[in-house]
Amino acid sequence: MAKFSYANLADSELVARCVNRDPLAWTQFVERYSKLVFWAIKERLSSRGCYCSQEDLGDIFQNIFANLWIKNLLKQVKAQEKIKTWLIMVSGNMAIDYVRKNNMQAIKEETSIYQSISERLPDEEELTLESVLASGSGDPRAGASANEIIKLLEQEMEKLNSKEKTILELDVLYDMKQKDIADVVKLPINTVSTIIVRGKEKLRESLKEKIDFLRHI
Amino acid sequence: MEQKDKFSLILEAYLKMKTSHKKMQKTKDCPGEVVLSGYIDSSLSASDEDRVFEHISNCLYCLETVVSTRRSKELSGLSEFEEIPKKAIDNVKELPRRYGVFSPSLFLKKNIWLIFAAISFILSFAIKRYFIQFTVATLILSMKWIFETGSTRTLIMVYNAWRKKDTDTLEETLGRFKDREQFKI
């Protein structure tokens, strides 16, 4: 009979043993996942434009594992063989909460990944409808047309369903690849591609039709 | 970097403006991490998946949690993990020793039938009129507790294997006992 070893346990078995408060399984769990957790903390914080010292990262790391053990959070995981995704998500969220609670660095509630990325580009001028319309057009109506465009786009976006709107947001704001968008919205890549192309074309046409000086866009 | 045309910039500026009004805040309607990670792993039922999608298309907090976790998961396969301070690792390994292994919820889950049996036993004396009924209930609940525990199941397997002279099963079951002994499970 093969010799039993915690190192050879499958993820699901290891997690199940940790849930049942097995200290040896916990040691193995720490060895197996500590690097992933540490990495996930850094990754999530940097994606939100927040950089911490190595010491703070160590505190956050210990806080996460302490929560996992003391509150026995691992018992929440149903698909224990897919622990990795849950662990990355929980580590990221706990890191953000920890930074916020301890006032280590201000993370604005409204800062999305998209905004924090654009804020980190110092040379880039802030993208507003007014600045886009004014750039290079020389048309005096450009500023005044911003409201008109917003109204028009709002009307057109209303016609899209929530899935189509989210797909457009992920494509335009997050600059995600179509394969990744398909994965997030759980649709075939061809469908996503069609929605993006058709959606943009429809919006472009309606802008061209109704606003004279945008005919060339 | 790819040069964007004017229409793309207009659309981007418009969506950015619309998104900036949405708060990046968790609400009581937001699904938990188990559900959201299940959504990323495609392990939810079709109806749950639809419900989660409906939520994330209206909740910036959850959408970003899904997008960033998904991205991190993908990157984690490509990244070289850095070494973590040894002290931090040692501290987290020490958690069971420092905080103990007792978990009230786990104890409750494992011994729920025993607790009911004990309550029924006490009631059999407290309400003498229903002494027999409570005693029978105590017996049933105790039996339930005994059969729910893993060691009893293992004992039955050993007994069955021994009776049928099934040596393979017997060895496998005895191996389970050895593991339990070795690791004090």
Image: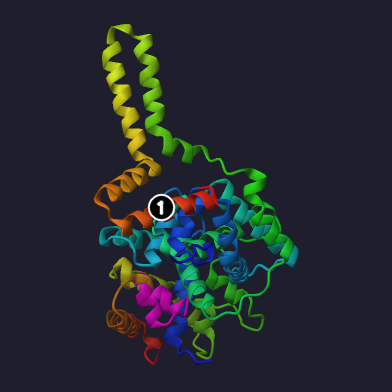
Which of these two is toward me, A114 or A181?
A: A181
Residue B89: image quadrant is bottom right
Tally the marks: 1
From the viewer's perspective, is B139 left or right of A87?
left
Magenta span has B139? no
Left or right position of B115 against B131: right
The residue shown at (38%, 70%) is A151
Q: What stretch is highlighted in magenta?
A: A165-183
- Which residue, given by chain and number where applicable, does mark 1 sit on? B174
* Residue A133 in the image, given as x and y percentages of width and height: 49, 83
Q: Residue at x 51, y 62 (%)?
A: A87
Relative vertical location of residue B47 with respect to residue B135 in this rendering, above or below: below
Which residue occupies the extreme top position in the image?
A: B129
Q: What's the coloring here?
A: rainbow
Magenta span: helix, strand or loop, mainly?
helix
Quarter occupied by the N terminus of chain A: bottom left
- Under mark 1, the amino acid is Leu
Mark 1, Cα crowd under 10 Å, few <14 / some 14-19 / many 20+, is some
Q: What element carries label 1?
A: helix
* Residue B31 visible (yes or no): no
Q: Mark 1 lies on which chain?
A: B
Q: Nearer the viewer, residue A210 or B131?
A: B131
Residue B116 lies, in percent from the top left, at 37, 26
Regarding residue A62, the answer to whether it shows in the image is: yes
